[in-house]
Image (cartoon, rainbow, N blue to C red):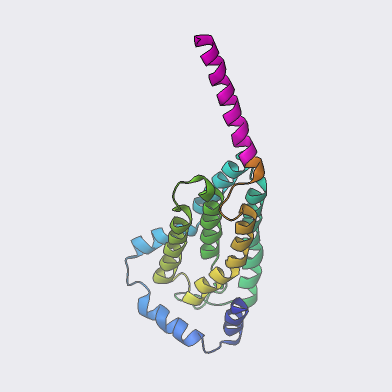
């Protein structure tokens, strides 16, 4: 609902665009470009996608193929949603009013789905709950860099977050509520059983 509202405001040049553009003009290039461009690069596909692919491979190897598939499909959905919306809204950029196709932010969507998706896949195997906060921080830094550099309006970033939230909720549901799948637990038991059997045999030989 909120995503639809923001999109409508962009299409209709609604009142939300006034504070959006004012805030952008107030903050653009207040931080050196060398810093904000590096932050924006966190949303590049060559940077973010390998993180998700590695997490998917790890989750699949541990028997959580359903969760890995959900994360992969969420990533595929990003360009499938972003590209048509960019063409439909044709919003100009903060520093390039002659250009079009800035709404929503593809870099924000890519970083959010890739990093948070990867975090949801590996979180069950970490002793402390650091993956998701770290992933959210990386996505937030990407968004901040895009706005401060003038690559996107703030509403472009907000729209991407709203758009990707349902995708990540699906991944979270597939990954389970912080627990491991039955197949993964069975694999662990099999490994433990083999290890225990080898230990018993070694003990027998020693005796």
Q: Is residue 158 depicted above or below 190 in this figure? A: below
Q: Nearer the viewer, residue 107 or 177?
A: 177
**Residue for point 32% across, 65% down:** 32
Q: Is residue 143 depicted above or below 16 in this figure? A: above
**Residue for point 60% across, 58% down:** 172
Q: Is 109 one of the magenta-colored residues?
A: no
Q: Position of residue 197 (x, y in %)?
A: 59, 22
Look at the image and tell me whether residue 69 can be seen. Answer: yes
Look at the image and tell me whether residue 45 can be seen. Answer: no
Q: Nearer the viewer, residue 28 or 112?
A: 112
Q: Quadrant of residue 100?
A: bottom right
Q: Position of residue 150 (x, y in %)?
A: 43, 72
Of all residues shown, which one is farthest toward the bottom?
15
Q: Quadrant of residue 113?
A: bottom right
Residue 194 horizontal side relative to residue 152, left or right: right
In which quadrant of the rendered image does the N terminus lie?
bottom right
**Residue for point 53% across, 20% down:** 199
Which residues are drawn in magenta?
185-207
> How many numbered marks appear?
0
Q: Is residue 86 depicted above or below 49 in this figure? A: below
Q: Which SS does the magenta portion mostly show?
A: helix
Of all residues shown, which one is farthest toward the front?
207
Q: Position of residue 83 (x, y in %)?
A: 63, 66
Residue 62 horizontal side relative to residue 146, left or right: right
Q: Nearer the viewer, residue 60 or 181?
A: 181
Q: Position of residue 204 (x, y in %)?
A: 54, 12
């Amino acid at each position: 609902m909120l995503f639809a509202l923001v999109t409508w405001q962009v299409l209709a040049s609604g009142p939300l665009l006034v504070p959006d553009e004012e805030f952008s003009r107030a903050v653009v290039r207040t931080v050196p470009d060398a810093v904000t461009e590096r932050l924006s690069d966190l949303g590049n596909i060559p940077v973010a996608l390998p993180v998700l692919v590695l997490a998917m491979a790890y989750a699949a190897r541990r028997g959580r193929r359903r969760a890995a598939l959900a994360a992969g499909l969420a990533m595929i959905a990003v360009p499938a949603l972003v590209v048509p919306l960019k063409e439909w809204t044709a919003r100009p950029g903060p520093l390039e009013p002659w250009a079009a196709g800035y709404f929503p932010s593809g870099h924000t969507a890519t970083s959010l789905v890739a990093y948070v998706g990867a975090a949801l896949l590996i979180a069950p195997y970490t002793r402390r709950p650091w993956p998701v906060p770290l992933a959210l921080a990386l996505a937030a830094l990407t968004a901040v860099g895009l706005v401060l550099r003038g690559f996107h309006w703030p509403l472009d970033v907000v729209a991407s977050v709203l758009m990707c939230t349902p995708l990540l909720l699906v991944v979270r549901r597939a990954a389970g509520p912080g627990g491991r799948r039955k197949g993964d637990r069975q694999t662990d038991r099999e490994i433990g059983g083999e290890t225990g059997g080898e230990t018993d045999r070694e003990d027998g030989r020693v005796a």
